Amino acid sequence: MKKLFYPVAAVLILAGSAFTFLTAPGWQIDKPYSIGFSIGNEAGIFKDFQGTILFDDQNPGAGKFDVSVKVASVNTGNGLQNTHIKSGEWLDADNYPQILFTSSSIGKKGNGYEVTGQLDLHGVKKTITFPFTFQKSGQAAGTFTGNFTINRNDYKIGKPGGDVADQIKIDISVPVKKI
C-alpha cells in the first residue's frame, strides 16, 4: 500500500502545482477609467465600472475578465437624455441594472490581444470577440484599451429602424494596478 501511496501523492502534488502556474496575476481597476459609447451623433460614458481582471501578457490564455457596468451610471452630458436612455424604451435600468461581460478565452492577436466572452446586455446574452491592447507602466500598473461595435437590435435596445443608428461603438480604457 505504501508503494502505491507515494507515486499517487507525487502525481497529485505535481498536478496541483501545474494549476498554480496557470493563474494569471490580478489587477485592480483604477481611475480614471473610461467606458464610452457612441451611436450616430450621440455619445456618453458609464461612470460605474467594476470587476475582476486576471491577466498575464506572457500567458494571456490564463487570464479572465469578469466585469460589470451599472446602467444607471450613464452620462451623456444632458440630464433629459440621461433619463431617456435609462428608461424602458432604451436600456431599461430598472429591469436590467447591470451590463456584464465574462470572458471565455483570451489570446495573442497581432500586436495586441483578443478576448471572447459573453456580453449580457438588456437581458440578452451573446458571445462577442474584440481586440484590445495592454500597455504596461512598470511592473505594477498598466492600461487596457479596446473598442468594438454591437448592433443595438441584437440586444433589443430601442425600436428597430427610425432615426437612430443601429451600430453602437464601445470604447474602453481601463488603467489597472497589480494586486
Image: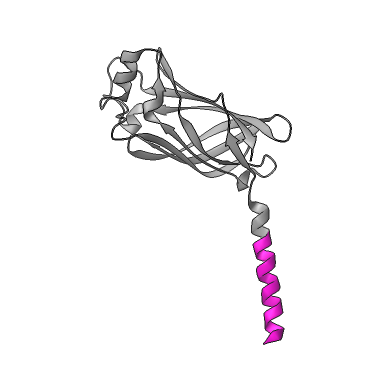
The quadrant of the image that shows the C terminus is: top right
Taking the magenta stretch, the answer to whether it contains residue 52 is no
Is 123 rendered above or below residue 171? below
In the rendered structure, which segment of residues is drawn in magenta?
Answer: 1-17
Left or right of 87? Residue 26 is right
Q: Residue at x 40, y 31 (%)?
A: 70
Left or right of 50? Residue 75 is left
Q: Residue at x 67, y 87 (%)?
A: 1
Q: Residue at x 68, y 67 (%)?
A: 13
Our reading of the magenta stretch's main secondary structure is helix
Left or right of 122? Residue 68 is right
Q: Residue at x 70, y 35 (%)?
A: 140
Count of marks, rendered view: 0
Q: For this rendering, which residue is in front, 174 or 22?
A: 174
The picture places residue 59, in percent across and down from the top left corner, at 67, 45
Is 170 rendered above or below residue 128? above
Q: Residue furthest right?
A: 138
Taking the magenta stretch, the answer to whether it contains residue 14 is yes
